[in-house]
Image (cartoon, rainbow, N blue to C red):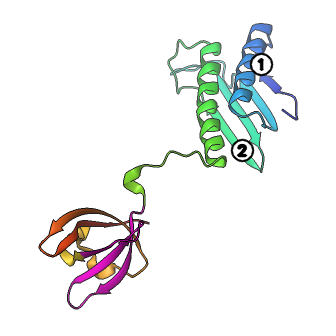
């Protein structure tokens, strides 16, 4: 980190075991994202008595270039009453790690792509009056489809150039799309 780890306490006495736990967890975050700019951790006990849940609030604020921020807050009452402060800190850092990993994957274009969401073809020709059209697949094949093949009866909303996903079947005159689903 460019800026040293910042730990603040409010209404809780600072102690070395808690400091060590926070430092250890922050170092593990650096393994997920080695280019973090800063990490600030606030630990507090906002009320002296809490009826439901734990009495601690832990907030973690991580800055990642370019101008991204990951913020996690574990609030009083969100966990079991018997949760000790180290447990709340671990939970907060686990949530921060997940968010940080998601951000890093997004920045590195390593986001998991689901095949069912990928564009498989483009609508290249439509004859709305006759109720049919043609799509061109990503490998250049032209495939016929009928208005009844369009999911959710959205044939009238189709426009040329839209990306679609489709299921192919063999028709009387060759391949045709048995199902067409428009993708955003």
Q: Which residue is mark 2?
A: 69
Residue at image coords 25%, 71%: 150
Q: Residue 134 vs residue 81: left or right?
A: left
Q: Residue furthest bottom?
A: 129
Could you tell which of marks 1 and 2 lies nearer the N-terminus? 1
Would you place residue 41 above or below residue 166 in this image? Answer: above
Left or right: 113, with 62 as reference point: left
Was residue 143 drawn as part of the magenta stretch in this picture?
yes
Q: Which quadrant of the rendered structure holds the C terminus?
A: bottom left
Residue hosting label 1: 23
Front-most of residues 141 and 54: 141
- Dot 1 falls on a residue whose secondary structure is helix
The residue under the point 61% across, 47% down is: 106
Quadrant placement of the N terminus: top right
- Above or below, 2 against 128 in this view is above
Measuring from the top left, give residue 97's x and y in whole percent: 63, 30
Q: Residues within 10 Å of mark 1 (few under 14, many from 20)?
A: some
**Label 2 Cα neighbours within 10 Å, binned few <14 / some 14-19 / many ≥20:** some
Estimate the spatial distance between the alpha carbons at disc 1 and disc 2, rounded to whole Å.
19 Å
Q: Position of residue 48 (x, y in %)?
A: 66, 18
Q: Residue at x 21, y 77 (%)?
A: 147
Q: Residue furthest left?
A: 172
Residue 146 vertical placement versus 6 (above, below): below
What range of the chain is rendered magenta? 119-144
Q: Position of residue 162 (x, y in %)?
A: 41, 74
- Please name whichever residue, 159 or 120, is drawn nearer the observer in this view of the structure: 120
Q: Position of residue 73 (x, y in %)?
A: 63, 33
Q: Secondary structure at mark 2?
A: strand
- Residue 45: image tag: none
The reply to whether the magenta stretch includes residue 128 is yes
Locate residue 24: give its quadrant.
top right
User: What residue is rendered at 88% in x and 35% in y?
Assistant: 2
């Amino acid at each position: 980190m460019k800026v040293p780890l910042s730990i603040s306490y409010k209404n809780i006495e600072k102690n070395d075991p808690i400091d060590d736990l926070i430092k250890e967890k922050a170092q593990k975050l650096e393994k997920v994202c080695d280019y973090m700019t800063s990490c600030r951790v606030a630990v507090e006990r906002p009320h002296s008595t809490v009826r439901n849940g734990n009495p601690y609030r832990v907030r973690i604020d991580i800055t990642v270039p370019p101008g991204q921020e990951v913020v996690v807050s574990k609030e009083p009452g969100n966990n079991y009453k018997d949760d000790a402060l180290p447990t709340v800190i671990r939970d907060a850092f686990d949530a921060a790690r997940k968010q940080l990993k998601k951000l890093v994957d997004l920045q590195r274009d390593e986001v998991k792509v689901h095949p069912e969401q990928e564009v498989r073809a483009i609508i290249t020709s439509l004859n709305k009056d006759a109720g049919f059209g043609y799509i061109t697949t990503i490998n250049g094949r032209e495939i016929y489809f009928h208005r009844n093949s369009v999911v959710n009866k959205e044939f009238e909303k189709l426009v040329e150039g839209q990306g679609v996903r489709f299921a192919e079947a063999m028709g009387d005159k060759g391949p045709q799309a048995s199902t067409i689903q428009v993708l955003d």
